[in-house]
Image (cartoon, rainbow, N blue to C red):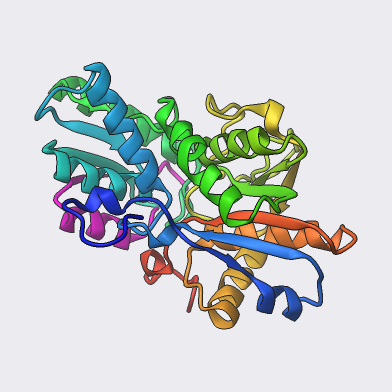
């Protein structure tokens, strides 16, 4: 994050602080360190601002995105918010395509930032607040159609390398430097897998012994190969029941951790009450997974995670009710 006066909001993306969660760790009667990088302090209130900026900059640089061309992408709300900010600053109309299963605050925020938002009905049997792989497939199909109809640039967060590069170039090195090189493991709730792969690549460049753990919802742990009877869950922003993610570098995965809905919600609320961190569902999942690693350790390890987005995006849900 730039110091002093800047000329564009995109200059404020990145450089987020890291908080050591001493009060929460003590409350849980554990030993060790949990280091939480507060990505919700980006202008769009999530880690996806970094991804949006990297994808658009790359596309403008290589000519795949031309001046004034429309940008379109599917989103659960965070990437769309980041793209609305970046596209607005750089002169590109932006269309966000989102499932109606996501919280309404996200759509409202994108509209306020100048984006056109198209909401896609959920698959039959879908539940509000729970976006499934089937829901995401419907959003993907509509996004492709919109991109084709308008000859728009598709800022595909599940495929474009910028989705991981943003975290490899910036988030990961920031985290390592801010921790004074004291990180034993990194845990990450996976959506596109861009942040897991990017941060882990950066950490492994600094120290080959850093362990990486993919975090999944307990009922949708398909990446680990677990057998699940139902795939629905309430942890918005990931866990889409996709068996393969193009950006997930499995050579960086040392293990898979699962978190159930209730634990993610309880941990998110504890973060707010004990640490003053007002974050979303996936942050609670990340911190819950980090605490699980502390429980299984000798108490001397440092586990890093990201506070993915702000709790202000979930006031219409039961996260804090």
Considering only vertical position in the picture, is 150 above or below 191?
Answer: above
In percent of width and height, residue 134 lies at: 47, 36
Task: Give whichever of 59, 6 is nearer the camera.
Answer: 6
In percent of width and height, residue 86 lies at: 23, 43
In percent of width and height, residue 51 lies at: 38, 39
* Residue drawn at point x = 30 percent, y = 63 percent: 105
Count of numbered marks: 0
Considering only vertical position in the picture, is 2 above or below 164?
Answer: below
* Residue drawn at point x = 63 percent, y = 56 percent: 179
Quadrant of image for the N terminus: bottom left
Task: Give whichever of 293, 319 is nearer the camera.
Answer: 293
Q: Residue furthest top?
A: 63
Considering only vertical position in the picture, is 278 above or below 228?
Answer: below
Residue 190 visible to an observer of this rendering: yes
* Residue drawn at point x = 21 percent, y = 32 percent: 71
Residue 74 visible to an observer of this rendering: no
Q: Residue furthest right?
A: 298
In percent of width and height, residue 162 lies at: 40, 30
* Residue drawn at point x = 44 percent, y = 30 percent: 158
Residue 126 highlighted magenta (yes or no): no
Segment tinted magenta in the rendering:
102-125
Residue 110 highlighted magenta (yes or no): yes
Task: Give whichever of 155, 205 is nearer the camera.
Answer: 205
The answer to whether 321 appears left or right of 145 in the picture is right
The answer to whether 112 appears left or right of 252 in the picture is left
């Amino acid at each position: 994050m730039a110091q002093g006066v800047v000329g564009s909001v995109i200059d404020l993306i990145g450089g987020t602080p890291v908080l050591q969660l001493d009060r929460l760790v003590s409350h849980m009667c554990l030993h060790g360190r949990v280091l939480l990088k507060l990505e919700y302090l980006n202008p769009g209130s999530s880690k996806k601002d970094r991804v949006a900026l990297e994808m658009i900059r790359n596309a403008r640089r290589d000519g795949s995105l031309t001046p004034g061309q429309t940008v379109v992408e599917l989103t659960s709300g965070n990437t769309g918010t980041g793209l609305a900010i970046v596209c607005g600053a750089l002169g590109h109309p932006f269309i966000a395509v989102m499932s109606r299963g996501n919280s309404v605050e996200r759509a409202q925020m994108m509209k306020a930032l100048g984006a056109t938002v198209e909401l896609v009905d959920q698959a039959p049997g879908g539940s509000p607040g729970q976006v499934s792989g089937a829901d995401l497939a419907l959003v993907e199909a509509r996004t492709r159609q919109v991109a084709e109809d308008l000859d728009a640039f598709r800022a595909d967060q599940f495929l474009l390398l910028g989705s991981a590069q943003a975290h490899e170039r910036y988030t990961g090195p920031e985290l390592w430097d801010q921790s004074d090189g004291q990180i034993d493991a990194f845990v990450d709730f996976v959506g596109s897998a861009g942040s897991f792969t990017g941060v882990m690549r950066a950490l492994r460049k600094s120290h080959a012994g850093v362990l990486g753990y993919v975090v999944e919802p307990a009922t949708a742990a398909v990446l680990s190969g677990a057998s699940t009877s139902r795939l629905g869950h309430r942890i918005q922003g990931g866990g889409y029941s996709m068996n393969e993610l193009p950006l997930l570098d499995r050579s960086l995965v040392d293990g898979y951790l699962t978190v159930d809905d209730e634990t993610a919600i309880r941990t998110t609320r504890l973060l707010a009450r004990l640490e003053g961190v007002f974050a979303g569902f996936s942050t609670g999942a990340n911190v819950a997974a980090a605490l699980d690693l502390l429980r299984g350790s000798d108490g001397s390890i440092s586990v890093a995670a990201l506070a993915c987005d702000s709790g202000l995006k979930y006031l219409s849900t039961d996260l804090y009710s």
